[in-house]
Image (spheres, grey):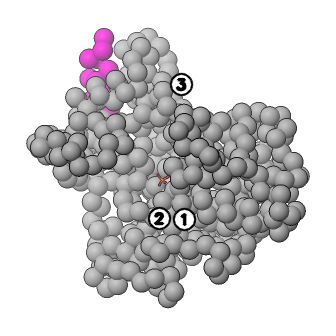
């Protein structure tokens, strides 16, 4: 309680926090300051890919911290080079740029797309189409790219050059695209917008339009990337090849890192002096990210898909047993969103907290982003606790 009072006094009040002060964690379990235990189905909003305090990850980060914690980007360091190589080899992309967050990765992607557009079709070729319901971050250009009005209120003026298309309508998208469009930017599964996966046919229509009109496809994989959806990147399941991929959340396993991956058309767009980050490619964080990628291998992805199946059908069964309503469980892999009948998503989260299970909301839906390494035992216990939480309403 003391922690919460202090927070209220000294920390800027920008988060609608839940009244729990977390103190430690292990795997998918964590404990509050009073020693109460919770199963974590949030991963810190998709960040702790390997759960809390994974021993191998700690060892790699710690060893790098004890060797060389940071240099500027004026020198070469091994972990960032290895991480770029691993990301490129596993995605087929050509180059990586490292920054510190999702919004920053998207800012860099927007800059690269504009520079590409200018060189391609002149100074007016700078427009970017995004989707309604999207979320691309809180900095001004990333916010301008975000297709949800309520995030924009009170913060104008924004950088211009953004327009918003209705998701899953190829015609709507086509009507917005012209010779001054340099990029279309999408999340294949909209995260903050309510965990809504785009239709496969729409994803193909986007790729086709980009091809026909010589427009870049920017794929925001900040939430969907690094195994979250059951493949390393969500685009693999949509059968399209983006020109720029951004990632962040799950990449560092709990430490801040963002990455922009550039494909064939974009790998040489940004030149020395065009873009930079003081903290980018921090060696200790990159050493940890290498462990994350190593573990999200074929076996790791199989585990993601198995856990996803269990949680999705378990969640659906619970809601059906308690309400008679068969819910549609949205999203992809371990990025799970569901509309809970009769109660708000926030009420559902609060009921979960009382039963010792941490969940999230996304727009009007309940959202689950469990650690990718959640065990069958932790999954079963989380489902039991969610059922108890659900029972508290009926
Ligand atoms: C979270 C998120 C961002 C913003 O990431 P930050 O690290 O908070 O800046 C951008 N895009 C998507 C799809 C996200 O889910």
Q: What element carries label 3?
A: loop
Q: Name the residue under label 3.
A: 328
Q: What element carries label 2?
A: loop
Residue in view at x 33 percent, y 73 percent: 61
Cβ of mark 2 under 8 Å from ligand 1: the answer is yes
Dot 2 surroundings within 10 Å: few (below 14), some, or many (20 or more)?
many
Residue in view at x 83 percent, y 45 percent: 177
Closest to the camera, between mark 2 and mark 1, is 2
| Nearest to N terminus: mark 3 or mark 2 | 2
| Nearest to N terminus: mark 2 or mark 1 | 2
Task: Give the camera-side residue of 100 and 303.
Answer: 100
**Left or right: 280, with 111 as reference point:** left
Res 276 quadrant in image: bottom right
Dot 1 surroundings within 10 Å: few (below 14), some, or many (20 or more)?
many
Q: Name the residue under label 2.
A: 100
Q: CB of mark 3 within 8 Å of CB of mark 2?
A: no
Q: Is residue 211 visible?
A: no
Name the spot of residue 288 as percent of width and height, x first: 38, 69
The prevailing secondary structure element of the residues shown in magenta is helix
Q: Measure how far apart labels 2 and 1 are at the Cα level.
A: 8 Å
Find the magenta span and give its range. Answer: 383-394
Name the spot of residue 209 as percent of width and height, x first: 84, 47
């Amino acid at each position: 309680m003391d922690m919460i009072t202090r927070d209220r006094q000294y920390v800027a009040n920008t988060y609608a926090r839940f009244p729990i002060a977390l103190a430690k964690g292990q795997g998918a379990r964590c404990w509050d300051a009073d020693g109460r235990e919770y199963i974590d189905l949030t991963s810190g909003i998709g960040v702790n890919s390997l759960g809390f305090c994974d021993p191998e990850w700690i060892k790699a980060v710690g060893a790098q911290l004890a060797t060389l914690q940071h240099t500027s980007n004026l020198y070469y360091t091994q972990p960032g080079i290895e991480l770029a190589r691993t990301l490129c080899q596993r995605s087929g992309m050509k180059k990586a740029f490292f920054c510190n967050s999702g919004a920053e990765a998207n800012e860099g992607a927007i800059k690269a797309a504009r520079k590409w557009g200018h060189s391609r079709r002149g100074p007016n070729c700078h427009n970017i189409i995004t989707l309604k319901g999207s979320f691309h971050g809180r900095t001004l250009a990333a916010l301008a790219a975000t297709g949800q009005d309520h995030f924009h209120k009170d913060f104008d003026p924004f950088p211009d050059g953004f327009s918003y298309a209705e998701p899953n309508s190829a015609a709507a998208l086509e009507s917005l695209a012209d010779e001054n469009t340099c990029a279309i930017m999408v999340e294949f599964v909209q995260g903050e917008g309510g965990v809504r996966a785009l239709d496969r046919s729409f994803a193909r229509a986007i790729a086709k339009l980009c091809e026909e009109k010589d427009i870049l496809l920017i794929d925001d994989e900040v939430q969907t990337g690094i195994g979250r959806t059951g493949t390393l990147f969500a685009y693999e399941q949509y059968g399209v090849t983006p020109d720029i991929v951004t990632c962040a959340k799950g990449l560092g396993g709990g430490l801040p890192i963002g990455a922009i991956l550039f494909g064939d058309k974009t790998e040489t767009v940004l030149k020395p002096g065009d873009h930079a980050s003081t903290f980018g490619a921090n060696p200790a964080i990159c050493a940890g990210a290498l462990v994350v990628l190593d573990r999200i291998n074929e076996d790791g992805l199989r585990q993601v898909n198995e856990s996803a199946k269990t949680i999705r059908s378990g969640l659906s069964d619970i809601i059906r047993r308690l309400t008679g309503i068969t819910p549609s469980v949205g999203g992809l892999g371990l990025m799970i969103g569901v509309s809970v009948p009769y109660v708000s998503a926030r009420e559902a989260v609060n009921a979960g907290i009382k039963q010792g299970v941490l969940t999230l909301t996304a727009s009007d839906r309940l959202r689950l982003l469990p650690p990718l390494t959640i065990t069958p035992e932790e999954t079963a216990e989380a489902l039991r606790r969610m059922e108890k939480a659900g029972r508290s309403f009926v």
